[in-house]
Image (tube, rainbow, N blue to C red):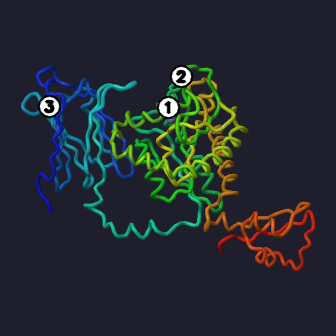
Amino acid sequence: MRIGVAMMLMISMLSAVAQAAPVTINNMRMWPAPDSTRLVFDLSGPVEHALFTLHQPERLVIDLTNARMANQVRDLTLAQGHVRQMRYASRNSHDLRVVLDLKGAVRPKSFILKPHREYGHRLVIDLQEDDSRDKPVVAKEANTRTRSKDVIIAIDAGHGGDDPGALGRRGTREKDVVLKIAKQLEALIKKEPGMKPVMIRSGDYFLSLKKRVDVARKHHADLFISIHADAFNNPRAHGSSVYILSEGKSSSDVAQFLADSENNSDLIGGVSLDDKDELLKMVLVDMVQNTTIEDSHELAGNVLSGLRRVNSLHKNHVEQAGFRVLKAPDVPSILVETAFISNPAEEKKLRSPAHQKKLAQAMLQGIKAYFRKNAPEGTTLAMQERRHRIVRGDTLIDIAERYQVSVGRLRRTNGLRGDVLRVGEILRIPVTGS
Ligand SMILES: [Zn+2]
């Protein structure tokens, strides 16, 4: 058992401000996620701070130099996620100590964010559940190895928590509508035999783009579909778009603009990705990605055809851009911009549960069309019997070749003796690999 101060993290920033007017904490927000909780302090300026944890019971202490709590914040109760309660007191007349009483062990991380969009200076504290301390690790392993026979579709609602995404003129937030659409899609997929949805984000909290991809891979996703709503300076811009990852440069300037604003998510969340190893990794990943891009292209085309029935299309073709969230090298991935939230008519539609459902149905149609041709081996969908209607000129050898089965199995499955095929007759195509 460890008692007392176990970890001491000192983060010194801008020590020059120490003599100036005190930094005020104007607001606090908390975003609980399943295995972590993010706490955000809205500040009047940059602050110097230090963190350390105490055990038995678990606590996190945050010391802020030359800081004070604004009056309106004093009554906020922030017992959410991993936090049982929060206390604070001033120290040596000008510093502030905040103590979080925790529900369990956490690994804390903190960083300062500069003003961005509607936000000013912020101090962000991430409390990552410390499973090395309270959970046995052994049981988890066995779980990840058994692969479900269902195809697994990772549904990623964009943005979340402190990152609202794009904003509509009536104040509609992208993070809210895309989560609703994602939940509609989840419900629809649950009803489909042979398919299983995995929600990357199930509530209003922030996940880095890298983490989103990691979650999908952890669940052995067969597909990754990231749901967003577009915004552009021109309120007349409208229509749905479907993106896949580009090998090189984006296919258009608008695509580049979008890629930038969606990728900026991580800057808003404050996670620094400017790490050289990361860059090298991505270059290597790009090399194995080309085959996945072909699959993604097919999936994107199918989803675009589905969306065409419920909304106008922004472009008539699949677009390519450098979205970081699409960078799972072995999972076909698409990013759907359901509509322009910056367009008043489309904003109104995005708010409507009936339209949200239509969008989800359109995406499901596309997903189903994709799996009819590309169900991964060993899944229930791949086992479903395929059929072939004989047309003039078909030969058994041609059909066998086309469906990658042997002529012998084709004969046995259909009880065929000779080589004569009747036009219009339907052949059952045996399942491959079983
Ligand atoms: Zn977005």
- Residue 136: % across, % down: 31, 67
Q: Quadrant of residue 56?
A: bottom left
Residue 65: image tag: 3
Q: Is residue 365 left or right of residue 10?
A: right
Report x, y in % for residue 172.
Answer: 52, 29
Q: Residue at x 14, y 60 (%)?
A: 2
At 13% from the left edge and 33% from the top edge, which residue is drawn?
Answer: 90
Image marks 2 and 1: residues in contact by CB distance under 8 Å: no
User: Considering only vertical position in the picture, is 386 above or below 346?
Assistant: below
Give whichever of discs 3 and 2 has the lower sequence position. 3
- Which secondary structure, mark 1? loop
Q: Amino acid at mark 3?
A: Thr
**Up/down of 22 relative to 158, above or below:** above
209 left or right of 178 in image? left
Task: Tell me the CA gap for discs 2 and 1.
Answer: 10 Å
User: Which one is earlier in the sequence, the residue at label 1 or at label 3?
Assistant: 3
| Image mark for residue 169 | 2
